[in-house]
Amino acid sequence: MIACLFRLSALCAAMSAQTETGVDHYSFEQVRAQVIRKATAHVEPALVTIETIGGAQPVRDGGPRGPVEESFRLADGPTTGLVISSDGLIITSSFNFARDPAIITVTFADGRRSVAKLLGRDHIRRLALIKVDEENLPEPDWVPSDELQVGQYAMACGRGLGGTQPFVSLGIVSALNRRNGNAVQTDAKVSPINYGGPLVDIEGRVMGILVPMAGSGGALAGARWYDSGIGFAIYKREIDGVFDRLAAGETIEQGKIGVILEPDEESSLIPLLDKLLPPAKGVKIREVLEHSPASRSDLRVGDKILAIDGQPTGDLSELQRRLSDRAAGETIMLTVKRRWRKLDVKIKLVPRSEIGKPPEEDADSNAEESSDEPTTRPVTD
Amino acid sequence: MIERKSNAARRGDIRYALAGLFIVLSASPVDSSDHNVAPNTVQRAFDGALSSVVKLYGGGGLGRLHGYGTGFLVSADGKIVTALSILVTRPTIRVVLSDGRKYDARLVRSDEYRQLAVLQIDGEGLPHLNLTKTDSVEPGDTVIAMGNWYKIAEGEEHVSVNRGILSLKTDLSARRLTQDFEYQGPVLIYDAITSNPGAPGGPLLDIHGNCIGIVGRVVEAVNTNTRINYALPSEEITAFLGGEPSPKATTAATTGKQGKPYVGIKISKFGFRHVSAYVQRVRPGSPAAEAGIKPDDLIVAIDNKRITNADAYRAAVDAMRPGQLVRFIIKRGQRVMTFEITIGVRP
């Protein structure tokens, strides 16, 4: 009896499907497949295959152990890029050049090959801009970022497996404005197959450029999250924000202050008083590194950082997160509390590599340091 | 431009159709709240195939090798196809059908190149899958994978099912641990995750529930160093079941007769193995010389396959047949050039 009812209702569904829209469940699958193919075909002319020759597995500072190889082993297969302007500029992910290759070639959708030059890299957003001597390249369509909605379909395209056809994986937009507002998050499968490629909507319009950006640590850290259902694509507006600097050949690196921080446990001798003074929540400076922006500034051990650029910082992880988005060369204003005083300290951030180097010819910019450790341990920032 | 406009127009239609579909789905009395009866496509495909998919168990796992796997029936008299692994080489292979019936199977035949095996159980009138040619599916089409992943299906429980889309049809270039993976032929790549213990040997289905492939062993793609989710196409299963020799054996047999391939390029050597494939010398009168390749050219690719170093070049040449026309992509200074070379016979 129940089975009969079910069958009847199923029949009703099938009938209503046919009368109202002409689409049943089977047709849905077919329509979806067509939409995917059409969307891929729409972006495909702007999708390029990048191949590199030379270079080596990157190393990072392993502390007392000396330089260590990154745990994610890079392959030397093809990677993906997207034409961003018709006069030969191609946007891709810095992941694809982590080996510092000697030669870069680009193959266009129509099979033409060209030698490319690496212009600039943005290690914060994991982007890279390369240039080929070509004109009239097909530009993709971009989706205005305010049109994006959580839950809408998204497709991740790439050329990392070689061949003539692009790879496509299907998912949805999982979240907006992730990673300091830089990226849209997707559950489409993202991996070295499509880093540097576009995340597109059902019309083939580009939502962002896919990059490894999960987790913290070195340049390849996010790649360990490949195919996890947690992928990121950098918004066009963020690309536009750094475009001129990349085109001018600049390398954008995380900026560092040159301090080791620790969570501000309630170790104060007068916790009650601390609580009475409203803006006391902050992060404590445990150490100021030599030859760093911090050492050249007014910062001292024991200072409590309350705010960056006037915005209260809360806890250590929030401070780190907000600092992780700031580039070397930028100047920030830290509000610190030293005993009963509140001070504003201006700091010009430097790349991690410059921390600890005494000033030589250029007295202007010096050193600073960084942070990969979990937040429970003291960290440098 | 005209093409683009018509695309835009049709895009509108599709959006309308999709929107309409969602309305139907939510208004329908048998919507997703009633999983057991919804005429869901995945479920229909699954129902048909479910009874044909079997769980395999063998002796205890050894290290990273797992003592369980997946297979599927391809004939009513108990022929089961699965992936070749240590599991099927054991003296006892236990097969559990979706209805809980248990059988002991024996290994009938295996194929080292395709990494496939066929087992036999004693049965009659058993459910089995239909193999469908893969030209019926294109990237974007829904695919369904089934398997005994992580041994999650216990006792009489049926295997797990996962859906994705077909991402790409391409040739596989992969390795397993540190060794090159034997099978280098065409594969179906999809975005459902099957690079899991227990998954190899499971079927890949199209939305009709027909078998379009068999989930391959867990491997890493050479191009990316990441695990890929792939299936050998049904054509390979058919060829294997029909006893066709694997393509590798065929090429080896023919090259013997024709002599060794000859290009006439000497690659420069600096004493290191992994040095880019720069041309040091071109033998006068050789196919390379006739095509116009010169010393100091850098060989970037041959027939769209990347050549990263001297070893890769040698391997590529070894795989060629005399008389074959190949395309060399060369970097000379800042220019990328293409040369077509007809492979000769080594003098």
Image (cartoon, rainbow, N blue to C red):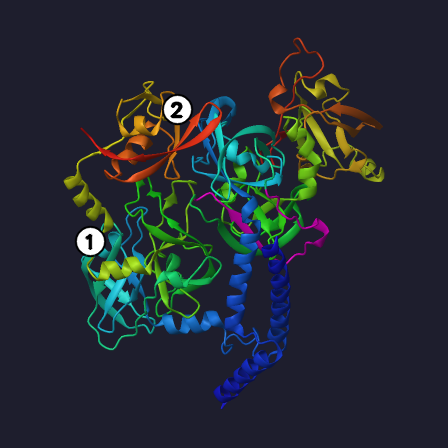
Residue at the top extreme of this rendering? A361
Q: Give the tally of numbered discs.
A: 2
Is disc 1 placed on a helix, strand or loop?
loop
Q: Residues within 10 Å of mark 2 (few under 14, many from 20)?
A: many
Residue B318 is at least partly visible in this image: yes
Q: Which mark is residue B245?
A: 1
- Name the spot of residue B187 as percent of width and height, x first: 36, 53
Tag 1: residue type? Pro
Residue A142 lies in the magenta stretch: yes
Left or right of residue B168, residue A28 in this image: right
Work out how far the residue at label 2 is from the one at label 1, CA to CA, in angstroms: 39 Å
Specify which label sits upstream in the sequence, 2 or 1.
1
Marks 2 and 1 on same chain: yes
Residue A182 lies in the magenta stretch: no
- Name the spot of residue A17 as percent of width and height, x first: 58, 78
User: Quarter-wise, where is residue B261 in the image?
Assistant: top left
User: Residue at left 68%, top 41%?
Assistant: A180
Subunit of mark 2? Answer: B
**From which residue to which does the magenta span run?**
A138-161
Secondary structure mostly seen in magenta is loop
**Nearest the camera: B6 or A368?**
B6
Q: Disc 2 designates what residue?
A: B297
* Quadrant where the C terminus of chain A is found in the figure: top right
Question: As displayed, is residue A260 above or below residue A138?
Answer: above
**Nearest the camera: A363 or A164?**
A164
Question: As displayed, is residue A119 above or below residue B80?
Answer: above
Tag 2: residue type? Asp
Residue at the left extreme of this rendering? B257
